Image (spheres, rainbow, N blue to C red):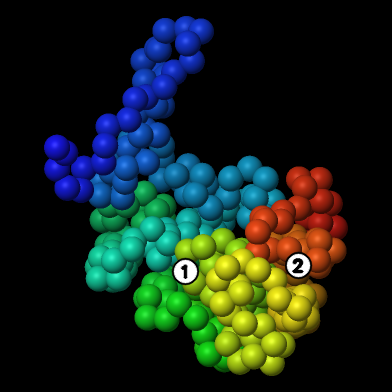
Amino acid sequence: MRKRGIPPARTLKFRQASRPTLGRIAVAFEAEIRRIGICRRLPDVCARAVTPDEYCRRKASPAGSSLYYGVRVLPPAKQQAMVAVHAFCREVREVLHEVADPRVARLKLDWWRTEIDAAAEGRAQHPVAQALMPALATFDLPRDRLDAVIGGVMADLERPAYPDFAALEEHCRNVAGNVWLLCAAIAGGADAATRLYGSELGVALRLTAIIRNLGAELRRGRLYLPRDELERFGVDADDLWRRQAPPGFAALMSHQTGRARARYATALTALSPTARRAQRPGLIVAAIGAALLDEIERDGFRVLDRHIALTPLAKVWAAWKASR
């Protein structure tokens, strides 16, 4: 009888064609401890396997991702800082997805607040917070933006759905608008127009993610569509929980897509011509996001039962056009 909290043993599998080498054993062991969550309790164990920067790249900008193409136009220090900010957002949002007990989730989010304070003081423990240390110092990033991301995820714990768009927009600004405000500052912009661009871009990208990941989030028990708009378009939330598309679903999703496109337009209009070159990372990610909306629309908004994605060639094409 195994003790509570200790996952069952699982055989580490190797190819039968050759005997397991020390390198293969190390890779299999790392995969196993990540599966059972040891990394989250002992981040220094994983930090020895990869550097903090590499950990963040794997977390937030793997090859072929939108951010991967966006940050490639930046010098190394700005790349590292922008990827670290996105990795932080991913880590914090994963608490919402991976921790079933709200009390434990709040404790973990509170821990992240203390870890950000530790990063500002140069004594962080988690690889993401360690990667943030030079970013906070070099670019003088305001910690309250990072804290607002945590606060946005904390608010998500209290409600699995949103009554209206005002509430959903607040969520988008907290968990994504603040991230892109920080990214705009890293790229090189502190004026009011660039701040508006960063905030609106974050909202647009979050709205795009909500549309694309609607089915996946429903499986996690979360509905990121305004309740009053469900009623307006005659969509029963119970149908969505069953991943069934009622007659008004396409019109509802077309409305959501139009709103996201409008936010992209607001962001791009706010950005001054002289700031466009510095803000190319966001412009590239925005172009890929807008292309993804087009693809979702062409596919008939079949997001309840599938994950719609752009091909690598489509992403490269969108990135190339946006970076010119």
- Judged from the image, the secondary structure of the residue bearing numbered disc 1 is loop
Q: Quadrant of residue 270?
A: bottom right
Q: Is residue 197 left or right of residue 52?
A: right
> Which comes sooner in the sequence, label 2 or label 1?
1
Q: Which residue is mark 2?
A: 301
Asked if residue 86 can be seen in this view, the reply is yes
Determine the residue positioned at 26% across, 37% down.
8
Quarter of the rendering occupied by the N terminus = top left
Q: Is residue 87 left or right of residue 129?
A: right
Where 73 sits versus 118, above or below? above
Give the camera-side residue of 201 and 249.
Answer: 249
| C-alpha gap between disc 2 and disc 1 | 20 Å
Asked if residue 320 can be seen in this view, the reply is no
Q: Position of residue 182 (x, y in %)?
A: 53, 70
CB under 8 Å between callouts 2 and 1? no
Where 277 sits versus 181, above or below? above
Quarter of the rendering occupied by the C terminus = bottom right
Determine the residue positioned at 49% across, 49% down.
59
Q: Is residue 174 left or right of residue 203?
A: left
- Judged from the image, the secondary structure of the residue bearing numbered disc 2 is loop
